[in-house]
Image: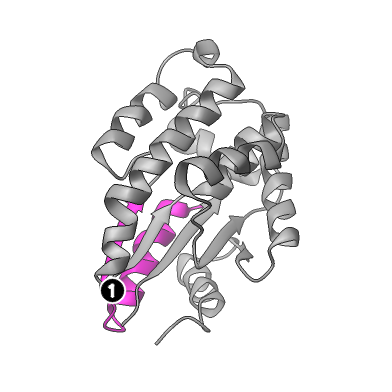
Amino acid sequence: MAGRFISLEGGEGVGKSTQLAALATALEGRGIEVLVTREPGGSSGAEAIRKLLLEGEETRWNPRSEALLFAAARADHVEKTIKPALAEGKWVLSDRFLDSSLAYQGEAGGLGIEAVRDLHRFGSLDFLPDRTLVLRLESGEGALRARRRDGEEGDRIGSRPPRYHAAVDRGFRVMAEQEPDRVKLIDAEGNPETVTARLLYALGDLLP
């Protein structure tokens, strides 16, 4: 059976971690072998870069440096983890991938979506998920959940102001408009089981 690559996206506090685990369990229940991974990270080199990206002062990196680090981590992740698992017929579920960089650094960070996409074309040869599922909540609700979960101190990116996270959400909506066959917006309201069912429905044409 051919492997599939699925990325789970969304802003802060939308429930990605919960839904990633639930989706993996649901797919395994269908007899699918699943590898769960994350970005930044997912390989030894990318995990080292993750610490550089998420720790330290907000001013540690300018937007271009941040985008380059994400692209470098992703290139290692694709080569060392994702493509080998797909070659073995596994389904790879990634907590974030390219579309996070497009939304966070491209749209919200002001670099431009196409400029960030160019880094991905170079670093990872424009390798894309078979399906990208973007969990969405009403504006501001996700960030409020994240603050309740983490306290006022989050990581460098999660602790940015509301206007930044509103721009992130706008970026995800832009991607869904540009690539409607790949990028699907998923309502993250409701109980976790209902949200998982929505994710599975959005994968229906890919399921065996």
Going by the numbered disc 1, the residue's amino acid type is Gly
Q: Quick one: quadrant of the N terminus?
A: bottom left
SS at mark 1?
Answer: loop
Q: Quick one: quadrant of the C terminus?
A: bottom left
In screen coordinates, is 99 left or right of 138?
left
The residue positioned farthest toward the bottom in the image shown: 208
Work out whether residue 13 can be spotted.
no
Magenta stretch bounds: 14-37
Report the residue at 58% width, 17% height from top.
62
In screen coordinates, is 39 left or right of 11?
left
Residue 6 at x, y percent in the picture? 45, 64
Residue 19 at x, y percent in the picture? 43, 61
Number of numbered markers: 1
Residue 97 at x, y percent in the picture? 48, 49
Q: Which residue is mark 1?
A: 89
Residue 82 at x, y percent in the picture? 33, 56
Report the residue at 33% width, 36% height from top.
46
Work out whether residue 184 can be spotted.
yes
**What colouring method underlies this structural image?**
one colour
In the image, is residue 204 part of the stretch drawn in magenta?
no
Query: For the residue carrying disc 1, how many other residues have a C-alpha within 10 Å: few (<14), some (14-19), or many (20+)?
Result: some
Report the residue at 59% width, 23% height from top.
64
Report the residue at 49% width, 12% height from top.
60
Quick check: 35 above or below 59? below
Closer-to-camera residue (185/137):
185
In screen coordinates, is 184 left or right of 4?
right
In screen coordinates, is 171 left or right of 207?
right
Quick check: 84 above or below 111? below
In the image, is residue 27 part of the stretch drawn in magenta?
yes
